[in-house]
Amino acid sequence: MSRILRGGHRRISCGAMTRMLASLLLMALAACTPAAPDIAVTDVWGRATASGQTTGAAYMTIANNGEAADRLLSAKASLSQTSMLHATRTDNGISSMTMVETLDIPAKGRVALTPGGTHLMIIDLAVPMNAGDRFFVDLKFEKSGNKTVGGKIVAAGSR
Ligand SMILES: [Cu+2]
């Protein structure tokens, strides 16, 4: 009986067994790694304001290079106490802005905040936005947490 069993089995060397266990472990680890967003914010800029103007706007590109979606929960520019995300919509040739609570950033996608589109409205400017000045925006993402990005103010009409 024992002779038959022994004859039917091929001996596996210790080295081969270790390699097999190692590759199984790697596969298990890969399967356990949760898909995560990978957020990169670029091209942060604002437009210089005219004298007396107390409201400005900032723009940026938010890319998600990860396998999971994320969501922008809030954004605040360093230029004033209050910022809010706005969407621009045009109905019958009349454009209006509506407040946006959150902004979905899809997996492997990008969302651009642009003039005429979604933008960060900067309310109650304490000082004018002057071309050449720099500012910061504190962003809060649902999964990626807080990110502070730097931007530059450009002259009106330059882009
Ligand atoms: Cu607005």
Image: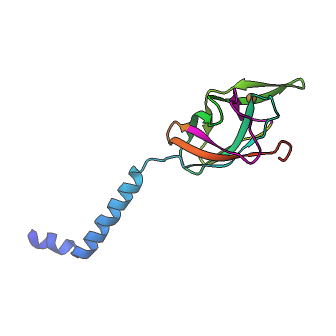
For the point 82% across and 34% down, which residue is it? 50
Q: Is residue 118 magenta?
A: yes
| Ligand number 1: quarter of image | top right
Q: Is residue 26 left or right of residue 59?
A: left
Q: Quadrant of residue 139?
A: top right
Name the spot of residue 82 as percent of width and height, x first: 63, 27
Q: Quadrant of residue 127?
A: top right
Query: Which residues make up the magenta segment?
Result: 116-139
Q: Is residue 128 magenta?
A: yes
Question: What is the residue that sits farthest to the right in this orientation?
Answer: 93
Q: Which residue occupies the foreground of this view, 105 or 134?
A: 134
Q: Is residue 137 left or right of residue 2?
A: right
Q: Which residue occupies the foreground of this view, 11 or 136?
A: 136
For the point 11% across and 73% down, which residue is it? 3
Q: Is residue 14 left or right of residue 62?
A: left
Question: What is the residue that sits farthest to the left in this orientation?
Answer: 2
In the rendered image, is residue 81 in sight?
yes
In the rendered image, is residue 12 in sight?
no
For the point 69% across and 44% down, which residue is it? 60
Name the spot of residue 155 as percent of width and height, x first: 81, 45
Q: Which residue occupies the foreground of this view, 30 or 137?
A: 137
Picture mark count: 0
Name the spot of residue 89 as percent of width and height, x first: 79, 28
Image quarter in which the N terminus is found: bottom left
Name the spot of residue 101 as percent of width and height, x first: 62, 26
Decide: is 119 above or below 154.
Answer: above
Q: Which residue occupies the foreground of this view, 22 or 115?
A: 115
